[in-house]
């Protein structure tokens, strides 16, 4: 999570799951990021983790009960409910989910969840059978219908020894969900953003393939920015070195043909389409069904042209739909990008320099410029990919107005 200058208060509700120990790291990381964290431990959580740890990590008194004799007005449940920017319940047991869904208020945390109008984010952690039980699933759907958000659960080995769905997700995913929930600008709320990310792989034989150096970092940054702004996001993912952000729908498309097929299908309903993937221009005409051997002499591979994904989307665009492309270039950056924006019928193109140390595939930064359909060029300073994503969606938002 990035360092923020925000002094927003997050109430960290910790409930009685064995995953409660992970809440210590969550508290520490949130404070490190600049948030004020008020921990609230249920009675069951106190059997697993100690208040002193959370007080040391947050610098704040831990709320442990409704009738604490040392309670002061600043931790009274109505006061906290009114000033909190977010309630994060991590771990969230089946019990607290049921209480929140049914309006039961029998301890400090469940009572305050009724009183707050702040966003509520649950990170479930429980036995697989408990999570899959119809009652729990119904309670989750009730809370989602009321605007509550969920992150996870994940799959893996559980404390009870079984393997399945129910683990609290890793802390970085929870922190990303916090970023999404707290982002102030929701100018893409209600919109569907589809983007391509990563690099395609074209098979030579069952073992080898033709690929490129794309890491998927730019696509990931774009997806995260769109999620923070309130959009529903689908990523059509080639090979990515980084995991997609929490909350995005992911459709894997390894080859250019696969990516084009999925893109044309999803683009029909997309409000915004961003082609950030490095799509291979060529594929092997006849991939071998058997592995090529070193002993083969004079191995020849015939290449044929791949479909141009973003061009196909641009050609079929609807009125009011925004289509954005990327142009990765080693030379004549602006000239080549201006040609592409016309040929591909785009609203905006991001021309980015590749093949240099601080810009391009696998780097954390880009040397880029934006070019619109009128040919107007806006050159950016060296920027992180997250900064480029923010600036890009600022312009998309302007185009949607």
Image (tube, rainbow, N blue to C red):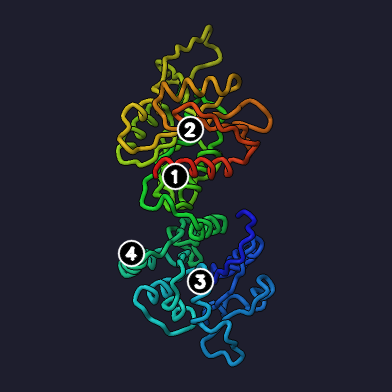
* Residue at screen point 32% across, 70% down: 135
In-front residue for pair 4/46: 4
| Residue 353 position (above or below residue 28) | above
The Cα atoms of the two marked residues, 1 and 3, are separated by 42 Å
Image location (x, y in percent) of residue 160? 48, 67
Residue drawn at the location 65% of the way across and 36% of the way down: 382
Q: CA distance from mark 4 to mark 2?
A: 34 Å
Q: Residue at x 62, y 41 (%)?
A: 384
Query: Which mark lies nearer to you, 3 or 4?
Result: 4
Marks 4 and 1, how far apart in space? 26 Å
- Mark closest to the chain's N terminus, 3 or 4: 3
The residue tagged 3 is 17
- Left or right: 380, with 276 as reference point: right
Q: Nearer the viewer, mark 2 or mark 1?
A: 1
Is 2 located above or below residue 377 in the figure? below
Q: Nearer the viewer, mark 4 or mark 1?
A: 1
Spatial separation of the CA atoms under disc 3 and disc 2: 40 Å
């Amino acid at each position: 999570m990035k360092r923020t200058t925000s002094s927003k208060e997050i109430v960290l509700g910790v409930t009685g799951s064995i995953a409660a120990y992970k809440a210590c790291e969550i508290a520490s990381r949130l404070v490190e990021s600049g948030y004020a964290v008020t921990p609230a431990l249920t009675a069951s959580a106190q059997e697993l983790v100690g208040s002193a740890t959370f007080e040391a990590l947050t610098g704040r008194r831990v709320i442990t009960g409704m009738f604490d004799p040392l309670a002061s007005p600043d931790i009274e449940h109505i006061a906290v409910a009114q000033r909190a920017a977010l309630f994060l319940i991590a771990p969230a047991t089946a019990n607290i989910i049921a209480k929140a869904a049914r309006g039961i208020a029998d301890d400090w945390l469940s009572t305050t969840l009724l009183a707050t109008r702040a966003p509520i984010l649950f990170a479930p952690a429980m036995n697989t059978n408990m999570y899959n039980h119809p009652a729990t699933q119904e309670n989750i759907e009730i809370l989602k219908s009321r605007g509550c958000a969920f992150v996870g659960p994940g799959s893996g080995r559980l404390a009870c020894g079984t393997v399945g769905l129910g683990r609290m997700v890793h802390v970085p995913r929870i922190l990303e969900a916090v970023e999404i929930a707290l982002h102030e600008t929701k100018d893409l709320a209600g919109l569907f953003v589809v983007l391509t990310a990563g690099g395609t792989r074209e098979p030579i034989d069952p073992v080898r393939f033709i690929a490129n150096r794309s890491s998927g970092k730019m696509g990931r940054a774009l997806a995260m920015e769109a999620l923070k702004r309130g959009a529903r996001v689908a990523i059509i993912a080639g090979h990515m070195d980084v995991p997609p952000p929490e909350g995005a729908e992911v459709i894997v498309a390894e080859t250019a043909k696969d990516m084009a097929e999925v893109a044309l299908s999803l683009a029909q309903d997309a409000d915004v389409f961003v082609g950030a993937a490095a799509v291979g221009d060529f594929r092997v005409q006849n991939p071998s069904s058997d592995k090529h051997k070193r002993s083969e002499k004079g191995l020849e591979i015939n290449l044929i042209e791949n479909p141009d994904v973003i061009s196909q989307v641009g050609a079929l665009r609807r009125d009011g739909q925004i289509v954005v492309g990327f142009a990765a270039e080693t030379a004549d950056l602006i000239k080549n990008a201006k040609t592409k924006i016309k040929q591909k019928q785009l609203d905006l193109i991001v021309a980015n320099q590749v093949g240099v140390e601080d810009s391009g595939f696998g780097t954390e930064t880009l040397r880029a410029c934006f070019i619109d359909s009128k040919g107007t060029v806006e050159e950016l300073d060296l920027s992180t990919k997250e900064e480029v994503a923010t600036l890009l969606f600022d312009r998309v938002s302007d185009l949607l107005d």
